Image (tube, grey):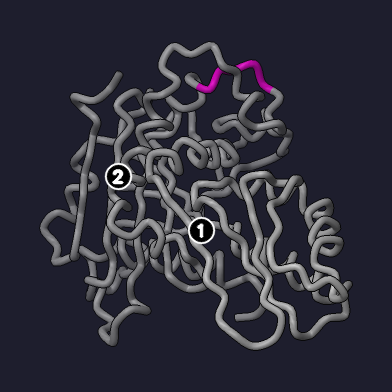
Amino acid sequence: MAGREWRGAYPEIIAYDYLNYPQRGSPTFLTEPVRINKKIDGTRTYSREIEKSGESDFDGYFAYYDDVFFDVKAFKDNVKEILESIYKEVYSRLKCTDLRLRGEYSYTHHYEELKSRRKALVNELVNAFDPERRNTFLRSSVVPEFSFQAMWGPGTLITMHDHDPYEYAERYHGEIFNHVDKFVRDKPSFIIYVVFHWSNLLPDYLSGSKKEFYRAYARRVFCQYRYSPELMKEKNSDFKGAQTVWEVSNDISAILFLEDKSILGDSRALTKLDAYWYINPNAKNRLFRSLPEHWLTTDLTILILDTFEHDNY
């Protein structure tokens, strides 16, 4: 699988495998209960509001439940990837082979700010770490939350980071609103986020606080904007409609986080998956407990099912 294709295909395979787990061994494996790939008219989602014409594509749906649609996304932190590309450009411009750079920053930092200031940051680093001066530290003025250490020649470079799952959820939950063309207005729909360890530090720095983060993320999407007048166009600059965030958020029925841990062990068993289901208590088209409860009787390692029934405020 070449290029970046695996980043889309692999999460989908993980999701299909998980969702079909109760049917394992059936001749209809990967078709029941999940049916793969579905196109629906774009007027049934928010495709037109983000100026996408035609149909909305979904990775799958449950026909048994009178159509429940889902789409799969890889959930990963892009900060490290962006920084590595920045370092590579800095080394190239300095024509320097013995320089190593590492950033110190909070893991709650959103990558969009780093991405938007990439060019200015590259210039700042090039100017700060001139091979003639051989500076070893920079506190960035381009991205003030970042500082950078330099190692000239061989050695060990140690950096420090901090992480707060609730701050991380506060900063990152808006990501889901980039996928409003997957929010169905007239049927239940949900997003599956697959979290995997391949080239992804997110599972590591979430560490023991991942459950807090997943829940806080979902709760902000489902409950934070209750009766808020904030418009969706303020969250997603591509959104041209007049709907509020609250109106749009009511058209996502659930979020499922699937954490793939298969790379951490030798076993190929599906018990290398942890699943965290969060159901939107304010959804116009509710996803009832009966669907995720299919997986309560399996031998999956973890299954959390949270409906926010008494936490919807």
Q: Eyeballing the image, is 6 above or below 160? A: below
Task: Work out which quarter of the rendered image holds the C terminus and state it.
Answer: top left
> Mark 1 and mark 2: span between their CA atoms?
17 Å
Quadrant housing residue 270: bottom left
Question: x and y percent of residue 245 in the render?
Answer: 53, 22
Residue 184 is left or right of residue 127, and the answer is left
Question: Residue at 76% of width from left, 46% of height from top?
Answer: 142
Question: Residue at 22% of width from left, 39% of height from top?
Answer: 306
The residue range painted magenta reads 241-245
**N-term mark: 1 or 2:** 1
Which amino acid lies under the numbered mark 1 shown in the image of this protein? Lys
Q: State the residue in front, 73 or 197.
A: 197
Q: Which residue is mark 1?
A: 76
Question: x and y percent of residue 128 in the render?
Answer: 81, 61
Q: State the residue in front, 248 or 33.
A: 248
Q: Eyeballing the image, is 138 above or below 313? A: below
Q: Secondary structure at mark 1?
A: loop
Residue 146 is left or right of residue 85, and the answer is left
Q: Which mark is residue 212?
A: 2
Question: Residue at 84% of width from left, 71% of height from top?
Answer: 133
Q: Which mark is residue 103?
A: none
Which amino acid lies under the numbered mark 2 shown in the image of this protein? Glu
Residue 143 is left or right of residue 284, and the answer is right
Task: Work out which quarter of the rendered image holds the N terminus and state it.
Answer: bottom right
Q: Eyeballing the image, is 289 above or below 108? A: above
Circle 1 residues within 10 Å: few <14, some 14–19, many ≥20: some
Q: Secondary structure at mark 2?
A: helix
Q: Indicate whether residue 303 is drawn in magenta.
A: no
Circle 2 residues within 10 Å: few <14, some 14–19, many ≥20: some
Quadrant housing residue 260: bottom left
Main secondary-structure element of the magenta-colored stretch? loop
